[in-house]
Amino acid sequence: MKTLFACALLLIGSAPAGAQNAPAAPPAPSLTLARPEAPNAAPVTITLADALQRAKQNEPTFLAAAADAASAREDRVQARAALFPTFNYTIADIGNQRSTKPDGSPGLLTGRFVSMDGLNMYRSWLVAHEDLNTSTLMGNGLRKAQASEAAALAKLEVAQRGLVVTVTRAYYAFITAQRKYSSAQSAAQQAQRFFDIARQQEQLGQVARSDVVKAEVSFRQQQQGFDEAALAMDNARLVLAVLVFPTFNENFSVVDDTQSGPALPPFADVRSMAERNNPDIRAASELLRAAIRWEDATHVK
């Protein structure tokens, strides 16, 4: 027992020396965000129309709706073609030719009537086939295909409108983020300049230490705002890049057309366009007209 206790004390006493002689563990690698390098080619300039066109070629939901609409249109074409009769063309030998034996000698005739056309006669058929039933007469298959096509086209329109809204928001969110980044960068540079001037004046004894601290606090705040603006701009660029490009690509620029937008049409034209393109507004307008007519009729009585 004493021997075991002595060995334990020896191991405990030698542990710090061994730890000092052991090589230091390598530092853990710092976590870095992987970001692809920009290619040497010039950035692609994208307008809003280009962004919408590119998004229609890459957005999965819109492509699925477009494929469903194309499939429904083909189903309608096939259903319409199924209403027409089918035609089959066949040709066959009547068999009026004299038969021959296996050795090649002439055999007996077939016994059929041989016309003046000769022994070798053929018959051709053009057969028209049509299944006349209730479904065919009423066109149920075609009506079902037309309804399916109308539903697919409506879903395609909804997907297209949703895609336009999403791309437009992402496009102008990126432009706004760029403007905020520019403003934050200018503010951070001015705060840096003011902080440097305050430190120089402190060294010359012209200002108190509290003024330098205030300038430093203002600089830190502006620098934090600049970092946040840079992060927001990178996020907006990433969102737009995912919508516009089939592969990850951040080497592009957008056209800031917020100052050169077309003038809005008169309110009457806007109202007519909204009633023509928006079913909710069209229904509300019809209800309003019906209510006005009902009120006029009530007052007349």
Image: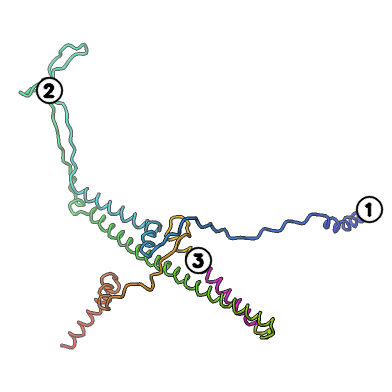
Amino acid type shown at disc 3: Asn
Mark nearer the N terminus (2 vs 3): 2
**x%, y% of residue 278?**
29, 71
| Residue sitting farthest toward the right | 2
Give the magenta part as a residue range: 212-235
User: Badge 3: how crowded within 10 Å, few (<14), some, or many (20+)?
Assistant: some
Q: Which residue is mark 3?
A: 235
In the displayed structure, does residue 134 sit left or right of residue 228?
left
Residue 172, magenta (yes or no): no
Mark seen at residue 165: none
Q: Circle 2 is placed at which residue position?
A: 120
State the colouring used for the structure image: rainbow
Look at the numbered discs 1 and 2 and tell me whether their residues touch, using CB distance below 8 Å.
no
Residue at the (85%, 59%) spot, across then down: 16
Which residue is under mark 1? 3
Name above or below for residue 299 compared with residue 175. Answer: below
